[in-house]
Amino acid sequence: MIGISYITVSEWEVGLLYADGKFVRVLEPGRHRLLGRPWTSVEQKVIKVDTRRQQLSVQGQEVLTADGFSVRPNATTDWRVADAPTALHGSVSHSMALYNAIQLALRVAVQSRTIDALLADRAAIGQEVTEALQPEADRLGLEVSAVALKDIVLSGELKKLLARE
C-alpha cells in the first residue's frame, strides 16, 4: 500500500516518533506503522536511541591533592540512556555533558584527599563520584551505574619521593 511504511525498533533501543518536527511519543521495541506523505500532510520521522550499557573513559587531567601533589586520575564509567526524550531534548550531546560532569566530580573528590588517602582507597573515590553524578545524570536522562578509578598517574618527582619511603 502506497504511503504506509514500517519501522522496526530493536530490543536494545527505543524510537522517538516526531510528526512535523514535534515529539509525539516513545516507540517501544517492535514493528511500527508510519503514514507517509500521499495519505497525510504530516511528515513522520523516528530517531532510534540505543539504551544498552556503555562505557566512557575519562582521561587524566592534572589535579592537586589536598597536600599539594599533582596527579592525573583516569576513570571509567558504566552508563546507559534511561529516559530517551530527556537525553535527546535536554542536551546537544548527553555523552559529552556526562564526560564533563565526571571530570568535575573526579576533580572535587581528588582535591579533598591527601596523596596517601588517594592511593589507599580508590574504590571510595569511585563511589563518591558515582553519588555526586546522580543529580546531573538524572537531569540528562541517563543512569550511571558505576564510576571506577582505573589509574592514578603520578609525576616523576612524586614517584621518586614515594619510592624513598
Image: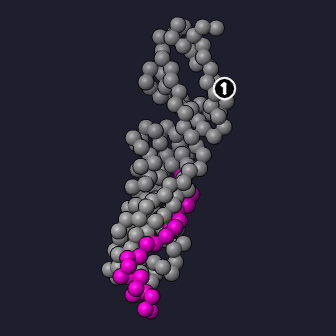
Q: Is residue 6 visible?
A: yes
Q: Position of residue 25 (x, y in %)?
A: 54, 29
34 vs 15: above or below = above
98 vs 46: above or below = below
Tag 1: amino acid = Arg
How many other residues sit within 10 Å of disc 1, few (<14), some (14-19) or many (≥20)? few
Q: Which residue is mark 1?
A: 31
Q: Which image quadrant for residue 118? A: bottom left
Q: Position of residue 1 (x, y in %)?
A: 64, 8
* 155 magenta-colored: yes
Q: 101 left or right of 45? A: left
How is the model colour-coded?
Answer: one colour
Q: Position of residue 53 (x, y in %)?
A: 59, 50
Q: Is residue 109 visible?
A: no
Span shown in magenta: 143-165
Q: Position of residue 56 (x, y in %)?
A: 50, 54
Q: 105 left or right of 45? A: left
Residue 22 or residue 147, whichever sits in front: 147
Residue positioned 56% across, 15% down in the render: 35
**Residue that extends furthest to the left in the rendered view of this protein:** 68
Residue 71 or residue 125, whichever sits in front: 71
Q: How many numbered discs, if any? A: 1
Residue positioned 52% across, 78% down in the render: 121
Residue positioned 40% across, 69% down in the render: 72
**Residue that extends furthest to the bottom in the rendered view of this protein:** 165
Figure quadrant of the C terminus: bottom left
The kind of secondary structure element at disc 1 is: strand
* 16 magenta-colored: no
Residue positioned 55% across, 61% down in the render: 146
7 vs 120: above or below = above
